[in-house]
Amino acid sequence: MKRYAIVGSGLAGHRAAISLRNLAPSSSIHMFGDESHLPYDRPPLTKDFLLGKVEQAQLTFSDVQTYDTLNIHYHHATRIVAIDRHQRSITTDRNEVYEYDKLLLATGSRPRRLPEMEDARAIYLRTVDDAARLRSVLEPGRSIGIIGAGFVGLEVAAAARDRGCAVCVIEAAPSVLSRGLPPLVSNAIQRLHLSRGVEIVCGQTAKAIEWTRRGPINIELSHRSFSADAVVVGVGVIPNTELAAAAGLEVDNGIVVDCHLQTADPSIFAAGEVTKHPVGKGGALLRLESWNVAHKQPLVAAACMTGHDLVYDEIPWLWSDQFGQNLQILGDVADSQDFLLRGHLDSEQWTLIALNSATEPTGAIAFNSGRDISMMRRILKSGGNLPLDVISSSRPVSAMVPVC
């Protein structure tokens, strides 16, 4: 009987466990997670959960109820502390040892922490417990300070404003969403937030914070200060690679895997946003922080762990919902300076198509335009050209300097 072990009980670990059971009906499957909860969906934590539209029980994956009938052994509140590659075994924090034939590392990531934000009252949003704590303070009239204007920070800002809070977002970079998106998109999203009453301060960091025993938290910036009832920090994440590194696996801002999600050890695979995997035609190794990676990679990993020859070659895709508006990013848009624009950036629906130096499409950014994303996915997969009607309904634009 084959023995499969999964470290991590997020979306990637959960999907791998279900898939392994389907592919290997008589195998032994053990999944380990350091949270006490059943595996649950994380994207709603910064959206519907904060808004009170869903409750904690509704976040749990529906098919976790099949663990018992599928004979999937879920070890909750259990941390794996060591991998013995020679013995092909893992050790828990209770000094329990489990042997494996194939091991999947789906260890995910954790919030990047700021030294000046180590006070227990700072909220780093990652788990459902973090989100529940934040939701409890999002009451009308309260003031929320948000450090970081990435997707997490802006989604929290939108939810807090919708809950009637005053919101100030502080970003060290010159613009919001500055990592990997062109300035004209940053401008458009910033205008959305400003129109909904969010205050945005770019190009500054918190110089000092007074964590008062009771009452508002005082945040000192370069040219002003403000008080907040709560401070949320969203300045990126760090992949949980320590376990893999200690086992001698290759780590480089992620666990390095090939197109089959296999590490240099043929018995160990990895899946989810902890992986640094080949992307695109050139096969550049990248680590992508998106739901899609955690959703699709474990299926490929499980197949390869059970002897099938599958390749992970999904086009990078992520999305964000803010103030009821949907932003989607597909493919490679980070290095493009030239785009085709469908619609108007100050409207409620538009699409930017990224072009390379040969004017070939490499990706797209769509605002409330899922149909264009579907079209672009087909084009990027097939390597085809843009339809004539798309070209004729678009106009060329270049990235512009953001104003913050």
Image: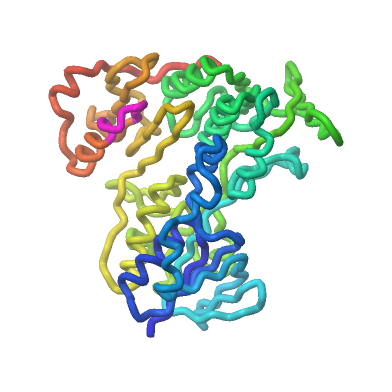
273 to 68, vertically: above or below? above
The N terminus - image quarter: bottom left
Q: Is residue 356 left or right of residue 30?
A: left
Q: In this view, does 136 lie to the left or right of 307?
A: right
Q: Which quadrant of the figure has residue 340?
A: top left
Q: Is residue 238 left or right of residue 270?
A: right
Q: Is residue 168 visible?
A: no
341 to 23, vertically: above or below? above
Q: Position of residue 222 (x, y in %)?
A: 73, 20
Region rendered in magenta:
365-373
The answer to which of 103 and 360 lies nearer the viewer is 103
Q: Position of residue 83 (x, y in %)?
A: 55, 73
Q: In this view, does 123 lie to the left or right of 247?
A: right
64 to 399, vertically: above or below? below
Q: Can residue 124 be seen in this view?
A: yes
Is 183 contained in the magenta span? no
Colour pattern of the rendering: rainbow
Is 371 contained in the magenta span? yes
Residue visible at 35% across and 18% down in the picture: 398
Q: Position of residue 201 (x, y in %)?
A: 62, 20
Residue visible at 66% across and 75% down in the picture: 94
78 to 311, vertically: above or below? below
Q: Residue furthest bottom?
A: 1
Q: Residue furthest left?
A: 388
Q: Which quadrant of the figure has residue 168?
A: top right
The answer to which of 54 and 353 lies nearer the viewer is 54
Q: Where is residue 28 in the image (x, y as percent from the top left)?
A: 42, 79
Residue visible at 29% across and 27% down in the picture: 353
The C terminus - image quarter: top right
Residue visible at 73% across and 27% down in the picture: 228
